[in-house]
Amino acid sequence: MRDDPQAVGDYLRGLQQRIVAAIEAADGHACVRDAWEKGPGEPLQGSGLTCILEDGALFERAGCGFSQVRGPKLPPSATQHRPELAGAPFEAMGVSLVFHPRNPYVPTVHMNVRMLAALPAQGEPVCWFGGGMDLTPYYGFEEDAVHFHRACRDALAPFGDDKYPRFKTWCDEYFFLKHRNEQRGIGGIFFDDFAELGFERSFAMLRSVGDAFLPAYLPIVERRRATPSGERERAFQLYRRGRYVEFNLVWDRGTHFGLQSGGRTESILLSMPPQASWAYRREPEPGTPEAALYSDFIVRREWL
């Protein structure tokens, strides 16, 4: 099979539609759909669709965006592992989402699936895939963590027994706040610059990961969405959301790629929570559920 970016774009648009329909049904409110286009005179050309649900019954903010853009020069964040492609024109497309639920017992979730094609002046286009999903709870539950990781493992199983342990480790290493010496959440799977199975099988793996997202996340949402909570849980949720903001702005390659390449800032930053807070040297009391998050969940563990 020839490299076929159009087939990737068609799949990604359909994936976004399915995910948005599912979260609208779960929340009971509709997303705002914001179609956009970049034209001549801008750093990038292309188009996309940002779907965002704010102030819903279930989701305080849930954003799911699709973009397909072209640019004259790959930014540094895309070539740090492929220096031979520095300066090449490129095409990038992907679906990216972050859901920030209202109830502190429902975890925040992130998922991204994407393809990047470098178009060097000499030689054939170079296509590679990336993505994954990870879960960031505020209150930890073993069964939720196991369920999420099992869905990730099962999505990768047809593509080799090495993929889940390898991509889980990659996720643990990537979603790590170096300046805090702290994991962002319980992880999941992450891969980047991936083309080792050839275009057809690498694309099939991308589809398997994308298709696994709703079965991985929605059952957890339904288990936790009605859990009673109060001011204490809300305050801890907002404090932990501050860590999410720190990671996305300081370390996330996707955020850096979008901003460095001249992407649409409003869509790039759809991952930001609507509210977050910071406190100086806040330490949870020993023996509390908040302390258990640090000791039992946002540590590197084998969940399966």
Image (cartoon, grey):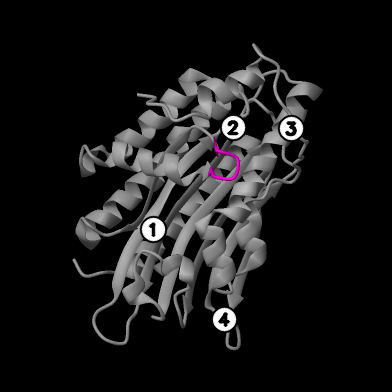
Q: Position of residue 90 (x, y in %)?
A: 41, 76
Direction from residue 199 to residue 266 in the image, left or right: right
The residue most toward the top is 287
Identify the disc placed on residue 43. Answer: 4
Direction from residue 246 to residue 176 in the image, left or right: left
Secondary structure under the numbered disc 1 in the rendered image: helix
Secondary structure under the numbered disc 3 in the rendered image: loop
Q: Residue at x 51, y 59 (%)?
A: 254
Identify the disc placed on residue 11. Answer: 1
Q: Amino acid at mark 3?
A: Arg
Q: Nearer the viewer, mark 3 or mark 4?
A: 3
- In space, the residues marked 2 and 1 are separated at their CA atoms by 27 Å
What segment carries the magenta color? 177-182
Name the residue carrying label 2.
107
- In space, the residues marked 1 and 3 are separated at their CA atoms by 45 Å
Q: Position of residue 253 (x, y in %)?
A: 50, 58
